[in-house]
Amino acid sequence: MENSLSNGHRFRRIPRQSVAVHPNMDPLLDENLEQWPHLNELVQCYRTDWIKDESKYGHYESSSPSSFQNQIFEGPDTELETEMHLSRARQTKMEDITDDDIPSTSGRQFLGTPFPESYPSKVLKHFGQSPLPAYEPAFDWENEHSMIFGQRIPAAHIMRGLKISVKVLSLSFQAGLVEPFYGTICLYSRERREKLSEDFFFHILPAEMQDVQVASESRGIFFLDAPSASVCLLIQLEKPATEEGGATPSVYSRKEPVHLTEREKQKLQVWSRIMPYRESFAWAIIPLFDNSISATSGGCASPNCPVASTASISGSSSHEVALEPIAKIMLEDKLAHSSGGSVVVEISNLNKVKESYTEDSLQDPKRKVHKPVKGVLRLEIDKLQAGQADLENISESGSVTNDSVDLGDRPTDSTLIKSLSNGADGPHNSKVKLNFHDEKGTPRNGTNPLGNLDFHANDFQAFDFRTTTRNEPFLQLFHCVYVYPLTVSLSRKRNLFIRVELRKDDADIRKQPLEAIFPREPGASLQKWAHTQVAVGARVASYHDEVKVFLPAIWTPQHHLLFTFFHIDLQTKLEAPKPVLIGYASLPLATHAQLRSDICLPIMRELVPHYLQDTNKELLDYLEEGKNVFKLRLRLCSSLYPVNERVRDFFLEYDRHTLRTSAPWGSELLEAINSLKNVDSTALLQFLQPILNMLLHLIANGGETLQVAAFRAMVNILTRVQQESVDDNERNRFLVQYVDYAFDDFGGHQPPVYPGLCTVWGSLARSKAKGYRVGPVYDDVLAMAWFFLELIVKSMALEQTRLLYNTLPLGEDVPPMQLKEGVFRCIMQLYDCLLTEVHERCKKGLSLAKRLNSSLAYFCYDLLSVIEPRQVFELVSLYLDKFSGVCQSVLHDCKLTFLQIICDHDLFVEMPGRDPSDRNYLSSVLIQEIFLTWDHDDLSMRAKAARILVVLLCKHEFDARYQKQEDKLYIAQLYFPLIGQILDEMPVFYNLNATEKREVVICILQIVRNLDDASLVKAWQQSIARTRLFFKLMEESLILFEHKKPAESMLMGCSSRNALGDGPVSPKYSDRLSPAINNYLSEASRHEPQGGTPENGYLWNRVNSQLSSPSQPYSLREALAQAQSSRVGASAQALRESLHPILRQKLELWEENLSAAVSLQVLEISDKFSMAAAAHNIATDYGKLDCITTLFMSFFSQNQSLAFWEALLPVFFRVFELHGATLMARENDRFLKQAAFHLLRLAIFRNDNIRKRAVIGLKILVRSSFYHFMHTARLRVMLTITLSELMSDVQVTQMKSDGMLEESGEARRLRKSLEEMADDHRSPNLLRECGLPENALISIPERFAENRWSWSDVKSLSESLLMALDACLEHALLASLMSTDRYAAAESFYKLAMAFAPVPDLHIMWLLHLCDAHQEMQSWAEAAQCAVAVAGVVMQALVSRNDGVWSRDHVASLHKICPMVSSDITSEASAAEVEGYGASKLTVDSAVKYLQLANKLFSQAELHHFCASIVELVIPVYKSRRVYGQLAKCHTLLTSIYESILEQESSPIPFTDATYYRVGFYGDRFGRLDRKEYIYREPRDVRLGDIMEKLSHIYESRMDGNHTLHIIPDSRQVRGDELQPGVCYLQITAVDPVMEDEDLGSRRERIFSLTAGGSMRARVFDRFLFDTPFTKNGKTQGGLEDQWKHRTVLQTEGSFPALVNRLLVIKSESLEFSPVENAIGMIETRTAALRNELEEPRSSEGDQLPRLQSLQRILQGSVAVQVNSGVLSVCTAFLSGEPATRLRSQELQQLIAALLEFMAVCKRAIRVHFRLIGEEDQDFHSQLVNGFQSLTAELSHYIPAILSEL
C-alpha cells in the first residue's frame, strides 16, 4: 500500500508576498533589532515563510467511479431492450451532429454498453458492478468530511474582497497632446469623503517626447472589501506649471479653433522641458458600481465577469434616460456574454481646475461647474482573479475557496464597474464610454492553480488604508506615514510649492535627510525628498499631493518631518526659473504620527540648529506673525508600531524581560500581560500573531508564574478573538490561520512549545480535578481546547520533522516519533481530565461537551500522523473505557463522532493493533461500537452508525491508494468480523429500519465481494443455523433493493395497481431518498446544462411543455424543498413526481443500477456457496440445500434486470449440475414448483433474450429429471400445475377490433416457448446464445454412465403442456358464450379436465366444474358420469397404493360404467405428490362420497342399472370397516334399485332414457365445428322442434352482418357445391341408438322396445341410425313400388352417456333397401311384434291385463278392417299387374311367405285374445274376427294358396 505523503515532506513552505512594501525599505528596518526583541519578533512574524502541515486536513485522492449503464427491467409485455437499441442508434445519429449534449449521469456518459464489456478483464470474475459504488455513485469525501460534528475545515488566509486593476491606455485632446501630463488614481469613498487607497501615479508623454505614446505600462491594483455604490475612482491630472504669458490650460477647453496653433505648440513644448514643477489641471470621479443599474440589468452573465450585466444595458434608450446617463456603452457582440474580459472606459467628463479645490469640496453641490476639458482619457479596468498574494488560498482541491476573490456567490458583484455615474456627481454634459475586450488566455474561472499570473513586475499594488482599521491580524510588514499638505494661507499671492523630507535629528542643518520618500517613477530608489504641485498665484494655496514616507523601525523623539516652502517665478528669462526659499515647518513624528485630524503649523523664516527644542523656539522668526498657516494631515500605516498603549507596554516589558534588564521576578511583565485583557479588540486582532508568539515564548521558557500568567492571558485573548470577530465557525479563521500557517515553533531555534503548554494546561486541569477553584478561565480553556491541541500537535510534528529531516534518505517517510515518558504521561493526564469534562458536561446536555469531544478526537487523529500509533491507542482506549457500552444518547453520539473522526485518518487502514500480533486496533473498536449502536434505543444513533460505516467503506473503495485486489482483500478482512457479529445477534439487524438495513446490507455485500473464497467459506463453516442466517441476510438484501416498477402487473409478484400505496407496494427504495441518493442527485443536477432541457433529451422533451419552466427547477435541493413545502412529501410516489424529469431519470438510472448490482452480487455469492457445498466443506443442510433454494426463489420472484437474467442461467445450470439430486428430491418440491412457475412466467416475456433463457431453464429441469427420476412424469406434473397457476395470472385472450376475442401475445409467446423446448434443431444455437456449451443438455453428468436424454420424451412433455395451454385458451375464448352455448362450455371444461389429467387435483377440479355445469342443464346422466370419473381417479390412486379395499376388478367394473376411467393402474398419481397438490387428498372416503353422488345422479336420470353397479362398489368399503348399519342401508337401496329396473322393464310403454339427434354444421362462422357432425343426447321429452329452436338460438348470436343461419329441412347427405356462400347451415335429424348385437342389415322396421329386454348394457350406446326414404324416378313421393329406403349408421367418438352432451361422429356407413324389401320388412316387423307379444312370459298368470291391452293394440293395427290397407296396399303394389312381372321370383316368394306368416300369426293372436277377454270385449272381438275374414278374402285374389294355408 502506497503512503500518501511518500516524499517525506510533511510541511510545505509558503513564501510571504509583501503588498505595497517597497523593497528598499530594508535599510530602515535593519538597524540593530537585537536590542528590541519584540521588533525582531514582529519582523520575523511578517517575513518568515508560512509553514503548512500538508496532512492535517486529510489527503484523499479518489479513483474515478465506473459509470452507470442503462439497466433493462422488462415486464411481460415490454421490449425496452429494442427501444434502447433504437434510441442508441438515434443517439449516434445525433452525436454526428453534436457531441456534448448527452444528459450525463453525475457528469458521466449516460448510455453505455452493458456491464461485462465495460469491466477490465481482471475483474471479470465478478458478475456485476460493485454494490457500494452503485449505492454511493457521487461519493464526495470532502463533503462527508465537512459534515462531521465539530467539523474542521482549512481557513483561507488572504484578504477577502475584490481586486481591481486600472491601466491608463491613452489621453487625447481635441487640441492635441504636446506636453507631458501626470496623474494619480486612487479609490475614493463618496460617502465617507475620504481616500480608501494610496495614489497610483501615471504619466503620459506626447508622441514627440518618446517613441511609444503610452509611457506608463504599469497597472494600478486596488483592493476592495465588497462592491459598493459609493466607491469610485478619483483621477487627478497635472501638467507642467503654466508659463506666464504662455499658452494657458484653457486651450484644452476652448471651443474654437479646435487645434493648437504651431506657435502655441512650440511654446508649450519648450516650456515643458524647462519647467520641472507641475500644477493641478483636471479631475474626474468614476463610480465603479452603481446600484441603479442592477435594477435594470438582467443579472450577471457569469460570476467572474467584471462588468457584470453589460449585455442587458447595451444602447437601449429607455435605460439611458433612466440613468441620466453619461454612459454610452459600446459592446462587441461576443463580449456581451464573455466571462473574465476587461472593460475599456473612455472618460470624457474631465473637469478643468479653475480655482483651488479640496477633495472634500468636489462633491459640494454649490461648487461652480468648471469648463469641461475637450479630451478623452482611456482606462482599462479589470477584475482580477486570486492574485499572487493569494496563491496559498487555492485549496487542496484545486479551486479557489469562497474566501478568495472569486465572488461568484455574492449578489452585489453583479454591478461591478458598470455604471460609471448616475449623474449626481458630475456635470451633465460630460460623457463616459465603455468598451469591452476579452483578454485571451485569462482563465475563465477560478481554477487556475496559480491565480492570475499576468502580473507585471512593475504593477503597482496600491496600499488599502482600511487594512489599518479592519478587525483582522496584520499579515504584512508595512511601516510608513502618508503626508498630505493641505493648505498654506499667506497674505500675498505666490506661486508656492513645498518640499517634504524626513530627518533623523535637528543637530546639523546641512546634513542630508534620510532616503525614505517613495518615488513617483516606477522602479526608482527611495528619494531624499518630494515636491508638491505649484499653487499658481494663490493667496491660499491648496494641494492634492500624497507623500509616502517610510519610517525607521525604532523612532527617537528626534525623528521629524521637515517642510520647506518655495516660490517660483513662472517666466522664462535667460535661464530656467529658480525657486526662491520662503520658509520652513517641522513636525516631530513621535508626538504627531498617531494623529488622524488636521495639524496646523507656523512657518519659520529660517532654521537654526536644534530647532525642535523648545528652548530655541524664541530664537526663531515666523512668517505671518507666527500664525499656524500651514495645514496638513498625516496617516500612519504601520504593522510594527502599535497605536494601543497597552500593547506597546507589553512589547516593552517583553523586551526588558527577554534582555534581562528588568528585575528577575518580572512583576511589570505580569502586569503588562494581565492588562492585555483590556486591550480593545481591533488592536488585539491586528497584533494577534506576534502577541501569541510572545506569550508562547513565555510559556515555553518562562518561570512557572509567568507560564501560568501567559497561559491565562492567552486563553483570554483566544476567547475574545473567538467571540468578537464576526465569524460563525467554531474555529475562528484568524486562529486557524495562526495555527495552520503562521505558527512554526520559533523556526526550531528554541525548544518546542508543546511540553510547556501540556504542563501548564495539565496542572490547571489537575487542580480542577482535585476540586481547587480555577476560575472562569477553565471553561474558556475547554472552549478553546481545539486551538491548544492543534498547537501541541503542530509543535510535535515540527520537532519530528526537524529532528529527522536531514538524516532521512530521500523519498522515505518520516518515522513516527516516540514521545518521552514524562511528556506522554502529562498528555495522558490532561486527556483524562478533558474526557471527564466531556462526560460530565454531556450529561448536562451542554453543547461545549460535543465540541470538546470533537477536539479530542481530532487531537488523536492528528497524533496518529506524528507519534507512535500505539501511544495514541492508549488515549483511544482511555476514551472507550470512559464511554464503555451503550451509554445515554448524548454520550453515545459523542463516542460515534469520536470514532468517525479518528477512522477518517488517511492511514486508518494501515494502522497496527495494540499488540504486535493483533490486526488493526481502530477497526476492531469501530466494528464493536457500531454494532453496539445498532442496538441502541435512539433511532438517530442507529442511522448515524450505519452512515459512518457506509462512508468509511466508500472512502476505502474509492481511495486511489487501495485499488489493487490485495488491498481490497485486506480491507474486507478488516471489516469481516462485523458480519459475524450481525449473524450472532440477528434481532439487532431486524430492529433497524429499512434505510439503515440498506446501508448495512450494502456494506456486507461490499465486504463479501472483496473477500477471498477461503475467508468467505469460514463464515459458512460454524453451524447450519448460522449459514442459514447469512443467507437470510442475502434474502433481505434482495427484498430491500428490489426494483419495482410503479404499476406492475400481478405477474411480477407485486400487486401494485395503486400507484400511491405504501408498504410492499411503495415503488422504490429511495422512498425517503436514502442518504446516498441526495449526493448523487445534487451531483447530477450540478452537471446538467443550465437554462432549459437539452435538445436531445427526447425522453422528456416532448412530454410536457412545462417541464423546463421555473416551477420545475434543476437543482435537487430546490426540487425537494419545493416538494416538501407543498406537502407532497407525504408519499414517495408524489415526491418522485415532483422531481424534474432529468432528475427523475437520474433517480431511476441510479435505482436500476443499484438493484442490478445487488442482485448480481447475491447471485455471485450463491454461486460460490453452491461450489463450496459441492466440496462438502461447509455447514449446511445437505438434505435440502435450503440456502440455495430460498435464494433462487427470491431471484425468480423479483423483477430483475436483463443483465441479471443473462448471468443467472449459467449459475442455474451449474447448481443443477452439482446438486441436481438434492434439488429434485421430494423435500424440494416447493422450490422446484416455484422454479418451474417462474421459468414458465419468463417464457411469456416479449423480450426474446429473457424468453430464450426461460426455455433453456426448462430444459435444464428436464435434463435433471431424466437423470434423477429416469422419466419426466413427475416434472410433467410440476409443469402442469404451474402452467395452471400461471394461466390464472396471465391474460391469454385479447379483444379484436370487431369485439371478438382472440389469442393474446402472451399466449402466443408461451406456445412458441413450449414448442422451442422440444425443438432439437434450434437447441444448440439457443444454448450458445445463453452462454452455455452446445452439448450442455446431452452431456452426461459425473457419476452417471449412460446418456438418458430423450428428445421424444421432451416432445411428449411439450405436447401435453401445449394441450393444457390450448384447453385454457379455448376456455377463455368461450368466456362470452359460456351462458348461451352450454354444449361448448361443457366441452371446454371436459378438455381442461383431460389436459390436466396428469395432476389428479386439477383433473378432479375440472371434472367437478363439468359436473356442476351438467346439473345446471339437468343433464343428470352426464353429471353422474363426471362423478363416476372422479371416483375412478381416486379409486385408481388407492388401488395403485394397494389400499386394500378395492382391487383391479372394481376399477374394471367402474370402467364399464364410464369408459373414461382407465382400467390400467399407473403410478402417475403418486408422481403428483407436490406441495399443495397430491394423492394424499385421494382417500376412500372421498371415493365413496363421489360414488354416492353418482348414484344419486344416475337415479335422477332413471338409469337404475348403473346405480346397482355403483352401490355394489360401495359395499366392500363398509364390509371392510364392518359398518353394518350402512351395509343394511346399501342392501335396502339395492332392493329398491332392482325393483325400479323391473318396473321399467314391465311397463307396456317401452322405457327410453333419452332422445338422440344428429346435428351437422356447415359454414365458416362455426369455426372448428364447420363440416363436422355430432350426436346430441337430449332428455327424453325433447322433440325435434325443440332442439331446432335451441340450436338456432345458440348459433344465430354468432352470425355477423354478412352471414345468415339456415336449417336444412331433410336428412339427406349435404353436398358442398350446393351450399351458398354467406349462409351457415344446420342439419338436425332424429336418430335411434343401435343395440350392441343388432343386425343393421335387417330390412325389418325397427320398433325399439321390441328388441331383447332392456338389460343394463343396453343403455350404453355408441352407434346410431336413421332411415331416409327416397325414389329413383326423381319424384319426391311415390307409391310403395317406387319407395326406396336409405339407412345411415353413425359411430361416435365415445359412448353415451358420456361426460359431455354431444359426441363427434367419427364414422358413417349407409345401406339401401329396395321397395319390395321395404314391403317385406314392414310385414315382417308386424309379424315379429305380434309373435313377441304372444310368446312373452308373464310373471304371474293372474296378471293378464297388461298383456290383453298390448295384444288388442297390435291386433287392431294389423287386422281391423279400416287399417288393413297396409297389407292390402303391398299386395296391390307388388302382386298385381306390371310390378309383379318386375320382381325376381325369389323376392316374390319371400313376399308371399311373409304375408302368409303374418296372417297365420294374426289368426293365432285372435284365438289367444278370445281366451283373455271378458264380457265387455265381445263386440271388439267379433270386429277383429270380421276384419280378419275380410282381409283373408281380399288377399286370396293375389295369393290363392292363402285359403288352404289358413
Image: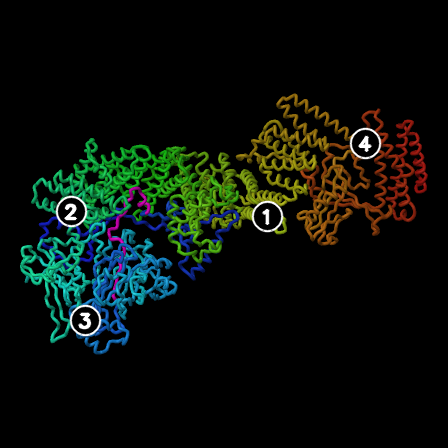
Residue 825 magenta: no
Residue 1294 is tagged as 1
Dividing the picture into quarters, in which one does residue 951 lie?
top left
Q: At x 80% / y 33%, what residue is drawn?
A: 1549
Image location of residue 699, percent across then percent down = 15, 41
In primary-sequence order, the first of circles 3 and 1 is 3
Q: Secondary structure at mark 2?
A: helix
Q: Which residue is mark 3?
A: 242
Q: Is residue 1224 left or right of residue 332?
A: right
**Tag 4: amino acid:** Pro
Where does the C terminus fall, quadrant-wise? top right
Q: Nearer the viewer, mark 4 or mark 1?
A: 1
Question: Depth-wise, is mark 2 or mark 4 nearer the camera?
Answer: 2
Front residue of 1691/472: it is 472
Q: Earlier in the sequence, mark 2 or mark 3?
A: 3
**Residue identified by numbered label 2:** 647
What amino acid does circle 2 point to?
Val
The amino acid on which the numbered mark 1 sits, given as a three-letter code, is Gln
